[in-house]
Image (cartoon, coloured by chain):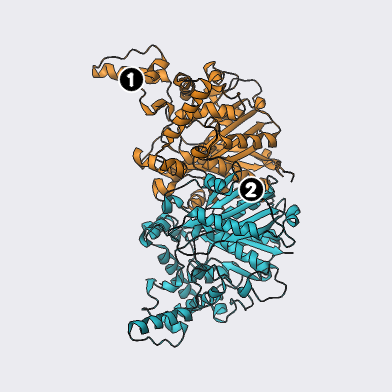
Chain colours: A cyan, B orange
């Protein structure tokens, strides 16, 4: 049976908003979404009336667990003043809002709507760290949890398998962390806008103030090697391999291609959409690859007619340092077993040939799980519009960027390609 | 701006499955979904290979709360053997799987996929009744919960407002309950396949066996009037006004219109889709109408080119007896203030001019919240195919049926019109 991978109707991104990410215990999800929404409204070059929104899709992992409130559709509808327009929640763990983006695109492509808001949010700070670990475990496979795995444990096992297969070591993971933290201070929304050297200096200052012996690290890697500075979580995942707990919200305004120029002279188009599912750890044939990511990439490349070589920069889901490396290979940016070398050579730096996580990634920008998918696409949209300021990808003719979002331990993946024409 | 309410591509239902509903503490959601899926596979007249499924959408309210497991996409993908195909969860409280149906339709209409499975599931029996009440409260508005409302309380307030506005009484609600329970024994999937007279007889038998005084009710209404038999929950909502707590799963197979006859010579087409959002109780101007239902109905009628008069029968969300009455008005089947009289006149009976809840409705069939939306559409599909057995709507040329699904206390509503050509 022939597959139709083309959308019946084109879709463009014409506005976007993202909160400053961090831990904001005294605020709530409505505050976050309102902040992202306000930025989005202001970002639409030719202006628009929010009452024109036909429908809304929101991604949220588990406000059920984190804030004891489910069914956010009508709460968001009321907040935005769009009642009785439809609002639909999607959930795919950490990929929840990438699914919202996708359903928003499909709703327009289907012919049903012209103007759709998509977004996501999560507030994790109302719970203790132990409770957050318990809540996030609901996103892992029940088999993984039954076997005693936590998220760092699963990704630790994947890292170990990768090391065994390709000869990489923990030192190679340091390069991912250092690279992401180099981008962080350039992103005003980042939860940790600090380089690794900033962390080193902060630590040294603290020791001096306390009159404690001042550590002598000869460089960033030396700092990351020090278990006092970078303690193990689940070997080989140490603290600086893991993304933080975060609060925040994100949104993007999608419109049908034929009306996009009513909103802006610089619309960014959806070129490719992909989504896949993956096995639980126990059922995977190979821990060094994600079948969900490969499938999502295949779908998106097929729809767009593009290949990995055409992607000029990408956000890649780096909940853990090893995830960024494996995904760079699964997305076709580098051959299997080659991505860690590419990172070592600086190829994924902001000024390299294939910038990865220009936003700083989940590791430094933050990871409010339900907001992340759309937050990644916000970064791609900002970059393609040339509005990323100090972290702007320094390439002439920036035209094609992508975002990869992972849910759970690999159960749900999306890959989305955006294009400036 | 002109709205495009037509889908770019037609969609047909070609298979369906629904578990027996009830409380099954020793089974789990995978068991339920597998049971519904197996029936669906067997129901496709010309057969099909489940590997042909392009994508899956599943509705679930809060397995996070009920069974401590979120992120069911990959679990269902693995269960069905469709990894790495995409599986997306939608949530809109009790309307969760109607949203899955809708997204499945849009995914096909968008041109992206040809064959999409949609379904839903919920297991509520692992929790105590008190815990279920707590979990369901997460689907109400936070303002309602803060004001001390539970679900029966909200619908009790709506009933009181309806009584005050239109002169209806509790006696009128009895007619809804009696009508639904008359359909129940005709549905082999129903959780309570009993008429009210069956309940009366069961009670009389029990009294006789225990040697207690045998109650003398002169008819069903007399039984429902007796607070010993039908105790108050939140006045005027008594026990027999409220749907039960249930477990179960449902699914439907959707395909692009142009390939529908590869699967069956009797496809049932999606004629109209509608979805709306609604205000929390405190912000509603009128408690006797649901703005979300009206909006959903408007969308579905516009898309289909049909009017309420064209709908030959309908499933209507009857989480509480008053909800069925108000929705019959909001959907345009009867004028405001007239539905309770219509029910009294028997117009909504299985053999009446406008059969409502031929399945027995949520009240008797059961309400596993995440499964309900698709379970309602399953009933419409079965009826339109003429395969409803003893509960078959006795109309010649049955061609158009509909299903209305409500989430929360009115926050999310869908209305879907199916058509046999």
Q: Is residue A214 above or below residue B272?
A: below
Q: Residue at x 76, y 53 (%)?
A: A258
Residue A230 in the image, given as x and y percentages of width and height: 40, 76
Q: Residues within 10 Å of mark 2 (few under 14, many from 20)?
A: many
Q: Is residue A281 above or below residue B61?
A: below
Quarter placement of the C terminus of chain A: bottom right
Q: Is residue A409 above or below residue A350?
A: above
Chain letter for mark 2, please: B
Q: Which residue is drawn at 48% across and 76% down?
A: A173
Q: How many labels does the image show?
A: 2
Q: To which quarter of the image does residue A300 belong?
A: bottom right
Q: Mark 1 points at which residue?
A: B203
Distance in Å between CA atoms under marks 2 and 1: 50 Å
Chain letter for mark 1, please: B
Circle 1 sits in a helix, a strand or a loop, which is it? helix
Q: Is residue B64 above or below residue B343?
A: below
Q: To which quarter of the image does residue B378 belong?
A: top right
Residue B95 in the image, given as x and y percentages of width and height: 52, 40
Circle 2 sits in a helix, a strand or a loop, which is it? helix
């Amino acid at each position: 049976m022939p597959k139709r991978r083309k959308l019946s109707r084109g879709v463009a991104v014409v506005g976007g908003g993202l909160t400053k990410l961090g831990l904001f215990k005294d605020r709530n999800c409505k505050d976050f979404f309102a902040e992202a929404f306000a930025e989005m409204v202001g970002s639409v070059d030719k202006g628009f009336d929010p009452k024109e929104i036909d429908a809304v899709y929101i991604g949220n992992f588990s406000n059920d667990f984190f804030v004891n409130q489910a069914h956010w559709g009508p709460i968001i509808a009321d907040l935005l003043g769009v009642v009785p327009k439809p609002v639909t929640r999607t959930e795919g763990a950490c990929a929840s809002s990438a699914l919202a983006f996708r359903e928003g695109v499909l709703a327009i492509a289907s012919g049903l709507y012209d103007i759709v808001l998509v977004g996501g949010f999560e507030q994790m700070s109302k719970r203790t760290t132990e409770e957050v670990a318990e809540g996030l475990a609901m996103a892992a496979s029940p088999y993984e949890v039954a076997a005693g795995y936590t998220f760092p444990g699963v990704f630790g096992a994947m890292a170990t398998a990768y090391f065994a297969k390709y000869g990489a070591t923990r030192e190679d993971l340091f390069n991912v962390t250092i690279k992401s933290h180099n981008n962080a201070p350039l992103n005003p929304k980042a939860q940790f806008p600090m380089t690794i050297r900033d962390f080193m200096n902060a630590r040294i200052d603290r020791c001096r103030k306390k009159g404690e012996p001042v550590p002598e690290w000869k460089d960033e890697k030396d700092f990351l090697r020090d278990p006092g500075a970078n303690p193990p979580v689940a070997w080989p995942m140490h603290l600086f391999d893991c993304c933080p707990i975060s609060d925040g919200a994100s949104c993007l305004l999608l419109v049908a291609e034929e009306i996009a120029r009513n909103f802006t002279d610089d619309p960014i188009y959806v070129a490719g959409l992909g989504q896949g599912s993956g096995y639980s750890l126990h059922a995977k044939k190979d821990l060094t690859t994600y079948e969900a990511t490969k499938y999502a990439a295949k779908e998106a490349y097929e729809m767009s007619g593009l290949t990995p070589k055409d992607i000029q920069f990408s956000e890649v889901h780096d909940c853990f340092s090893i995830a960024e490396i494996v995904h760079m290979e699964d997305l076709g940016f580098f051959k299997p077993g080659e991505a860690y070398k590419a990172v070592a050579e600086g190829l994924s730096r902001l000024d390299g040939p294939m910038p990865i996580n220009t936003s700083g990634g989940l590791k430094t920008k933050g990871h409010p799980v339900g907001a992340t998918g759309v937050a990644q696409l916000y970064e791609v949209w900002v970059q393609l519009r040339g509005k990323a300021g100090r972290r702007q990808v320094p390439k002439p003719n920036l035209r094609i960027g992508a975002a990869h979002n992972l849910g759970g331990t690999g159960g749900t993946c999306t890959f989305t390609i955006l294009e400036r024409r």
